[in-house]
Image: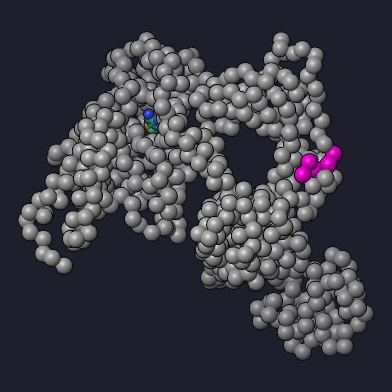
Amino acid sequence: MPTPDKKVIDRIQGLREQINYHNYRYYVLDNPEISDAEYDRLFDELSGLEKKHPDLITPDSPTQRVGATPLEEFKTVRHSLPMLSLNKATSEAEFLDFHRKVLELSKPGEKKIRYTVEPKFDGLAVELVFNSGIFALGSTRGDGVVGEDVTLNVRTIKSIPLRLMGKPNPDLIEVRGEVIMNKEDFERLNKNREKMGQPLFANPRNAAAGSVRQLDPKVTSTRPLNLFAHGTGRVEGKRLANHWDSILYLKELGLKISQYVELCESVEQVKAYYEKILGLRNDLPYEIDGIVIKVNEFSLQEKMGEISRSPRWAVAWKFPAQQEHTRVKDIIVSVGRTGALTPVAMLEPVRVGGAEVSRASLHNEDEIEKKDVRIGDTVVIQRAGDVIPEVVKVVDSKRTGKERKFTMPDRCPVCGSKAERPLGEALHRCTGIACPAQIKENLAHFVSKEAMDMDGLGYKFLEQMVDKKIIQDQADLYFLKREDLMKMERMGDKLAENLLNAINESRSPSLTNLIYALGIRNVGYHLAGVLAKHFKSIDNLAQQTTEDLTQIHEIGPIVAESIYNFFHNPKNLRVLEKLRKGGVKFPAEKVETRVISLSGKTFVLTGGLDSFTRDEARKVIEDMGGRVSSSVSKKTDYVVVGKDPGSKYDSALKLGIQTLDEKDFKEMIGK
Ligand code: IVH
């Protein structure tokens, strides 16, 4: 390796400074000074020099934003000061209430209250830690106390400096802010995803959050994200007396600050600010859902304190949900993964608060009835922040009499099987076990990021594979050959190879991902994690009774029943077996203290055992929570068969009850 001379070192240093400066002009100030081509030239020169002198690469070099390999999972981070949430006001009266309390709590002493006011960004809250000016750690807000370590992803956001600008740098500063995606970028991203057959993001906030909570920083680096800093956590080596100064300070350090932060001296000014920002709302390139009003003086903030994780010195004055009128062109029925039939209003496309809306779920039959929505009706559509668009009500005055009532079909619109509305449920369900719609939805769930994570396998491909009968269930994916893939439209050699690689790489999932992938009704990602932690393996989970399952804090009877039913459905067991045969590794997270429970299991004993008398065997079963019955019925779980068994053995065979010989039985009880 050539020894770098001082000239090279200086050039590298100079290039970094220039690039950082132009990054700042472009991403933070939105006001570039040089052309893209000139910027690229500087960047390429720096990359070239660093390639020749890798020992001169530093982590804060602008070339080092991306590069890490994907993570298995995020580590957790404890915030040194909790990240609080905000109380809400939804009307002027509620804001004035807040102000009255501020006046009361500030007594005695404070006469004049000043408020810093700023937009409430609709994104993902993060904290960035800079040690002596160098970006060291990025984390999500999480539950406010503990978040996820997303440092590698946050590094790829160009409006975040890897090295702070101001001199001297504080010894330590924790910057808090919101990661957002601009509306235009969000729509472009979704258009691309649609082309690739990938699931769409519901709104810019979800797109931003999904991009930051990505295990592969390379993917995050392709997402157009931005960060608005709106406060500080711990600060060492710099004294700040109020929020306004801290915002100015963040700006000085090179962070992106909203151009709309203002200092108000009176409630009248705050009210005027609210009106102004509300008027600007639709013209802003990003989504906001209100304004945040903060008592400016830190001393006063401290005096007022917080209550149930929200400060008493700040409030979010939310904007009303955005509403528009449009016409219901049709009502269609979509079929979900679990066979649920959902009526969906197909709308004359309309822009609601910057996003185009062309469909809105009507949830179920009762909901349609309650709102009396008919085909042809003019309706009010509402979109509130991160909420999926909904039909608020029918505009009665626009009724012409030509509208048509909608009734739920009694057959599944996809497979034609009978649709039923189970007693006590609001939803109709398709009863077809081979319903292609259910299969497709299940597959889409199975391959998704938080499940088996088969990158590139979009909905359009899955749909074709099911329609062409190349696959019938999730496990079939693991038996796909190149020839099978080549039967699909728009498939080329390279793409087929990528897909086969993605499938192959998915063969070693984490237990949480695998449980989630199975698509057990009512088991989302969080619960999958809880189950993985408690039961350590699929086999162990499959053996639990509903009683065992409800022992876990977060699992109620409905979820327990879903899990139990899932593992007692022969079709699912076949798929599990096929997954194993297809080479999927069922991770067995180490079981340190195996607690064996026979709780809820009914045994019948027949024939003589070598190591136990009948009574001893009964006692062992009962001690472990099981029950012994004298006759075999459909409710029997196991028949223990010893020497010279009686007619109970025949009954077991007839009813298809699982039999255990003495060896099996001893294994089961851990002897
Ligand atoms: S200040 C105690 N300022 O709103 C101060 N938060 O509901 C709490 N948010 O998690 C944060 N824009 O992510 C603050 N200008 C702004 C904000 C803002 C959006 C988010 C933030 C927080 C949530 C609280």
Front-most of residues 223 and 33 = 33
Identify the image quadrant of residue 407. Answer: top right
Against 440, residue 28 (above or below) is above
Front-most of residues 658 and 65 = 65
- Please indicate whether residue 442 sits to the left or right of residue 317 in the image: right
Question: Which residue shows up at 38% across the image and 23% down it?
Answer: 293
Locate residue 17, reporting x and y percent.
Answer: 17, 43
Against 202, residue 593 (above or below) is below
Question: Which residue shows up at 69% across the image and 59% down it?
Answer: 471
* Image quadrant in which the N terminus is located: bottom left
Identify the image quadrant of residue 56. Answer: bottom left
Q: Which residue, as the protein is rendered here, is positioned at the far right?
A: 647
Locate residue 40, reporting x and y percent.
Answer: 25, 44
- Please indicate whether residue 26 sits to the left or right of residue 375 in the image: left
Question: Which residue shows up at 10% across the image and 51% down it?
Answer: 10
- Please indicate whether residue 450 sits to the left or right of residue 468 in the image: left
Locate residue 660, reporting x and y percent.
Answer: 78, 79
Q: Majority secondary structure of the magenta segment? A: loop
Q: Which residues are magenta?
A: 410-414
